[in-house]
Image (cartoon, rainbow, N blue to C red):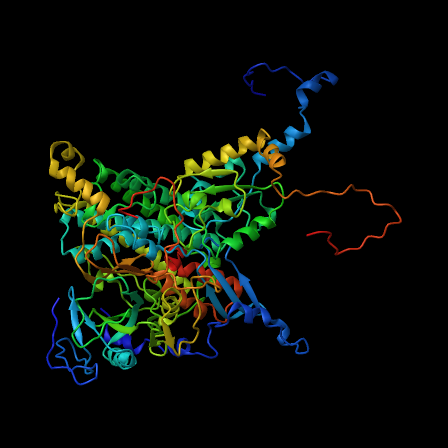
């Protein structure tokens, strides 16, 4: 993984002018590489803009939208220096059919009340994915057409995939191996 | 690769972008229950919200549909899912990377090897190891056979949903032969846990070429039987042609992949356009539809079986000798006989099966072309033997978003045909 | 007429009048007939949830063939079904549906818990899966496996049939007060008694 820091960060701005060496991406958001794939790191308020530019550039489909809760992670080493890590990270994967390339966006959504704008207007296919992210992680997507639970029952309390939500397993007799489970 | 001519014919995706007056019924249950309509208005009399599922005879698992109907016509609909939510992504955080395939294999239970493949490829990417060629060819063989058995399942359930009940028996008859081969190789008929990080669990058995040859000899004739029974039959054609139409722009906007996207005329298959494993060394066609209707989706799957058989035929000749798993002692358990001889082998065996092998920190996403579309696996690793976060991009979960738009304006009987042609597997929808 | 081989202890009954009675009738107790027919015509309700559903369908298909036990008709409506094969993992959201379907089935009804997920939660010991459907419905036979192959499922079904036919299950139900415990009031209303339709007593 290579990290590129071309210019020193601006005062309080999270935006850094980076040397983007892949394709005509006009908007400067910090970029890294992960196992041969480009990863952009827009801030939540840059997400819509970045996605718009990417869509105009040929990234015709949002393949996947998910969230990672970094609460018990030892510490991320693959973020650019300009990006402050937050507990919840929204990961959006896009694909460009014409050039057969993929790109990933990692948006630092927040620590307590993670919020990012919804990508529904650009990519209607994110409707179900964002509902799942809300249901399982509690990330709010502003301006989502149907912000409701999709997998858990409607009256479920809590967001199951958060790291502070228990697995909910019942103790099983004789299964006392401390190491694995 | 999509040609530039296709960009002109992509169509207008406007109706899937709509928030109001959309085919998607964005109403929750209590609001739906509260609707009573106006008894004075004679037109209001016909509009109702009908509940279909989660237990219903269409064998597509526990999918529930709220259908807003005007008489017999479906106006808006909402697929309600979550009835099979198993918390697999949470469970994955408690299982080592070696145990991971047992978990993901139960997501898409009609094509379990693909989920295992996506998971294993992602772990291998994070580890930075390369599996030996024979392992890759074995994986390709098993996956293509799994594609055939999954599409046969589609033919069976699709036929039965449309009334050709004998199709169910025919499809399962062929599937049994393939499952028998799987049982010989992997030990299980379903949910094999065969494709693991580092290679495959066991080598192909002696005489596998003979078994595969028998499958290849038997299947084309049976497929012709299906053509006689279904494809050329006027009733079948009337029920499927023109039903559930989608244009390419709408499919792209809804992130649909797989036969749904290809039925609209858009040629995108990961095996051809973003090749993984050795798909660039085999000769096969990407089957593309024209009208984007249910008949196209049926025909695509029918012909994809033929293309998979073509690939398998080529693999029979191309399969090299060699190891079936990577010889990295930290990842692959040693052969059982070595455990008696070598202390080191015993320790490695113990470590790998109790603690698991450590994967360095990183995050990666790898996708494969499953029978339903793009099946991707995103893993965030943190240096421990268990994934920090594992997410499977289930194609059926995303493809289900096309359902309201396909059913809009159709009759409820067409709705059954549409659900069947989308071919969702609820295990991977709900995970 | 071709000469048919005479097998076993057959007699020519063409000329029998009343003497042929013992050749032409079978006698049994009504109880046994009822149990025999219940066991031989046990129609399952479609309750395939996950992977086990595919193996259940394989059992119903041509190779393993449930039709030889009279069970190939999977009734979609639970009112017409005798047997509920819970095939697959039951999630928290699905549990009320399971109970609702079970309640709609008419007595006598049986439940086979197919697979380890239905029997005990299986490999999914977490927040989302009910750890065994016997928390929700009374189970008669448990079939282990992940998924149980068609042969295991058939073994479970045949075990159920044996227990139905020997009366074991109904005996146990009466002993444990299981089942729906439907008490039918004695019939024969008086002629001058008015009957109100649409009223149910109790629940």
The N terminus of chain C, quarter of image: top right
> Tag count in the figure?
0
Residue B260 sits above or below residue B307 on the image: below
- Res. A106 visible in picture: yes
Residue A61 sits above or below residue C116 on the image: below
Pick the front one: B194 or B151:
B194
- Residue B281 percent across, percent down from the top left: 16, 55
- Res. A96 visible in picture: no
- Residue B66 percent across, percent down from the top left: 51, 66
Task: Choose top left, top right, bottom left or bottom right for residue B290.
Answer: bottom left
- Residue C29 percent across, percent down from the top left: 68, 26
**Residue at the (42%, 69%) spot, across then down:** B245
Kindly give the residue lying farthest to the bottom in the view shown: A11
Question: In the displayed structure, does residue A49 sit left or right of residue B396?
Answer: left
Kindly give the residue lying farthest to the right in the view shown: C192
Task: Choose top left, top right, bottom left or bottom right for residue C171.
Answer: top right
Question: In the displayed structure, does residue B72 sit left or right of residue B150?
Answer: right
- Residue B353 percent across, percent down from the top left: 22, 43
């Amino acid at each position: 993984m290579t990290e590129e820091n071309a210019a020193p960060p601006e005062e309080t701005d999270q935006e850094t002018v980076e040397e983007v060496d892949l394709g005509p991406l006009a908007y400067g958001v910090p970029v890294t590489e992960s196992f041969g794939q480009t990863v952009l790191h827009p801030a939540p308020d840059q997400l819509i803009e970045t996605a718009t530019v990417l869509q105009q550039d040929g990234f015709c489909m949002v393949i996947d939208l998910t969230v990672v809760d970094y609460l018990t992670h030892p510490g991320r080493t693959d973020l650019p220096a300009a990006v402050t890590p937050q507990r919840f990270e929204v990961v959006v994967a896009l694909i460009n059919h014409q050039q057969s390339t993929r790109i990933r966006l990692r948006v630092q959504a927040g620590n307590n009340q993670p919020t990012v704008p919804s990508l529904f207007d650009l990519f209607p296919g994110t409707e179900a994915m964002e509902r799942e992210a809300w249901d399982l992680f509690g990330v709010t997507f502003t301006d989502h057409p149907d912000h409701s639970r999709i997998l858990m029952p409607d009256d479920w309390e809590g967001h199951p995939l958060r790291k502070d939500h228990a697995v909910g397993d019942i103790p099983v007799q004789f299964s006392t191996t401390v190491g694995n489970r | 690769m999509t040609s530039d001519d296709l960009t002109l014919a992509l169509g207008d995706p406007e109706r899937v972008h709509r928030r109001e007056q959309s085919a998607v019924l964005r109403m929750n249950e209590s609001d739906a229950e509260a609707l009573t309509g106006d008894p004075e208005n004679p037109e209001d009399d016909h509009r109702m919200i009908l509940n279909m599922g989660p237990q219903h005879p269409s064998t597509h698992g526990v999918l529930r549909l709220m259908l807003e109907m005007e008489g017999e016509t479906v106006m808006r609909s909402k697929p309600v899912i979550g009835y099979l939510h198993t918390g697999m992504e949470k469970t994955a955080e408690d299982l080592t990377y070696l145990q991971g395939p047992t978990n993901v294999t139960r997501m898409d239970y009609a094509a379990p090897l693909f989920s295992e493949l996506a998971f294993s490829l992602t772990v291998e990417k994070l580890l930075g190891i390369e599996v030996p060629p024979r392992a890759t060819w074995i994986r390709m063989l098993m996956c293509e056979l799994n594609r055939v058995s999954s599409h046969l399942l589609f033919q069976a359930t699709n036929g039965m949903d449309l009334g050709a009940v004998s199709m169910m028996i025919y499809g399962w008859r062929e599937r049994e032969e393939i499952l028998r081969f799987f049982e010989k190789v992997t030990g299980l008929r379903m949910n094999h846990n065969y494709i693991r990080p580092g290679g495959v669990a066991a080598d192909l058995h002696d005489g596998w070429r003979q078994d595969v040859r028998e499958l290849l000899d038997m299947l084309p004739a049976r497929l012709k039987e299906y053509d006689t029974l279904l494809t050329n039959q006027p009733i079948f054609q009337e029920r499927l042609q023109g039903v559930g139409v989608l244009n390419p722009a709408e499919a792209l906007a809804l992130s649909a992949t797989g036969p749904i996207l290809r039925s609209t005329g858009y040629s995108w298959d990961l095996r051809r356009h973003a090749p993984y494993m050795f798909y660039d060394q085999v000769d096969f066609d990407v089957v593309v539809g024209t009208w984007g209707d249910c008949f196209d989706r049926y025909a695509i799957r029918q012909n994809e079986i033929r293309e998979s058989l073509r690939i398998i035929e080529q693999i029979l000749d191309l399969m090299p000798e060699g190891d079936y798993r990577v010889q990295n002692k930290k990842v692959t358990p040693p052969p059982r006989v070595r455990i008696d001889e070598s202390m080191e082998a015993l320790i490695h065996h113990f470590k790998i099966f109790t603690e698991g092998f450590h994967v360095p920190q990183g995050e990666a996403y790898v996708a494969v072309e499953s029978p339903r579309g793009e099946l991707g696996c995103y893993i965030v690793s943190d240096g421990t033997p268990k994934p920090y976060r594992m997410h499977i991009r289930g194609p059926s979960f995303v493809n289900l978003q096309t359902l309201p738009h396909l059913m809009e304006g159709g009759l409820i009987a067409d709705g059954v045909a549409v659900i069947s042609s989308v071919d969702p597997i609820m295990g991977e929808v709900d995970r | 007429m071709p000469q048919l081989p005479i097998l076993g202890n057959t007699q020519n009954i063409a000329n029998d009048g009343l003497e042929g009675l013992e050749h032409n009738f079978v006698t049994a107790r009504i109880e046994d007939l009822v149990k025999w027919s219940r066991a031989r015509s046990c129609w399952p309700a479609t309750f395939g949830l996950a992977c086990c559903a595919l193996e259940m369908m394989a059992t119903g298909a041509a190779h393993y063939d449930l039709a030889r036990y009279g069970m190939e008709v999977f009734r979609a409506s639970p009112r017409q079904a005798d047997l509920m094969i819970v095939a697959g993992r039951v999630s928290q959201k699905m549990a009320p549906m399971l109970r609702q379907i079970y309640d709609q089935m008419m007595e006598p009804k049986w439940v086979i818990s197919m697979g380890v997920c239905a029997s005990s939660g299986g490999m999914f010991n977490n927040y989302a899966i009910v750890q065994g459907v016997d928390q929700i419905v009374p189970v008669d036979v448990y079939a282990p496996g992940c998924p149980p192959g068609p042969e295991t499922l058939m073994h479970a079904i045949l075990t159920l049939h044996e227990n139905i036919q020997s009366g074991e299950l109904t005996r146990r139900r009466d002993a444990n007060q299981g089942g729906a415990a439907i008490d039918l009031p004695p019939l024969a209303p008086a002629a001058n008694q008015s009957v109100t339709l649409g009223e149910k007593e109790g629940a």
